[in-house]
Amino acid sequence: MRVGIGPAKFGLKFNFCNNAHKGVYVSLYPQIQFAVPGAHPVANGLAEPGQTLILPLLVQKELKYITFVANGIINQPIHDPARDTTGTLGFGFGRAITRHTAAMVEVRYTSTLDLQRERRLAVNYGLMRRISGQCGPVRECWT
């Protein structure tokens, strides 16, 4: 068992398209991930050495009964020649069940850019429940 502080991330989200009338949203949110100084996460096996530049692009489309999300991510290691650049492609579908509950399914594939190493396919599913707070229509609760 390993206990400690893992890597930290800092980033900004840029919304390029927020068209609520058509239900289309496009965002780019570059991030930098790094080991927290003084916490020794690399030595403790909780973080990779160096930094990682993360460039995610998110496209969301609100349909009549579901929300569709596509996410493409490039992870570029900095100051660590031992790590390869990886890419992730993910697709998700979600639906509000009630004003307070929503369900989602996601399929995500990650690999090196040559598609030969570090290949991983993940399927995630889950339920979300709003705990408290006021919100308007169902869509506003989950955005």
Image (tube, rainbow, N blue to C red):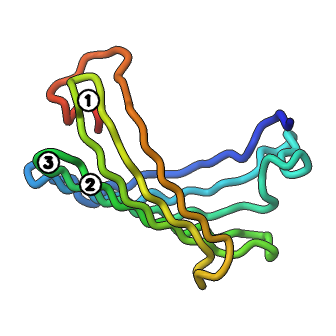
Label 2 to label 1: alpha-carbon separation: 16 Å
Q: Which residue is drawn at 29% across and 38% down?
A: 143
The quarter of the rendered structure image containing the N terminus is top right
Helix or strand or loop: what does disc 3 sit on?
Answer: loop
Query: Which residue shows up at 53% across the image and 57% down it?
Result: 122
- The answer to whether 87 appears left or right of 71 in the picture is right
Q: What residue type is disc 3 on?
A: Ala
Pinpoint residue 81: horizontal percent, then vertical percent. 80, 76
Which image quadrant is residue 52 in?
bottom right
| Residue located beneath label 2 in the image | 68
Image point (22%, 33%), residue name: 140
Task: Give the crowd class for mark 3: few <14, some 14-19, many >=20 residues within 10 Å.
Answer: few
Q: Earlier in the sequence, mark 2 or mark 1?
A: 2
Q: Nearer the viewer, mark 2 or mark 3?
A: 2
Residue at 66% from the left image edge and 54% from the top image edge: 33
The disc placed on residue 141 is 1
- Give residue 23's position: percent from left, percent from top: 15, 52
Disc 3 designates what residue? 20
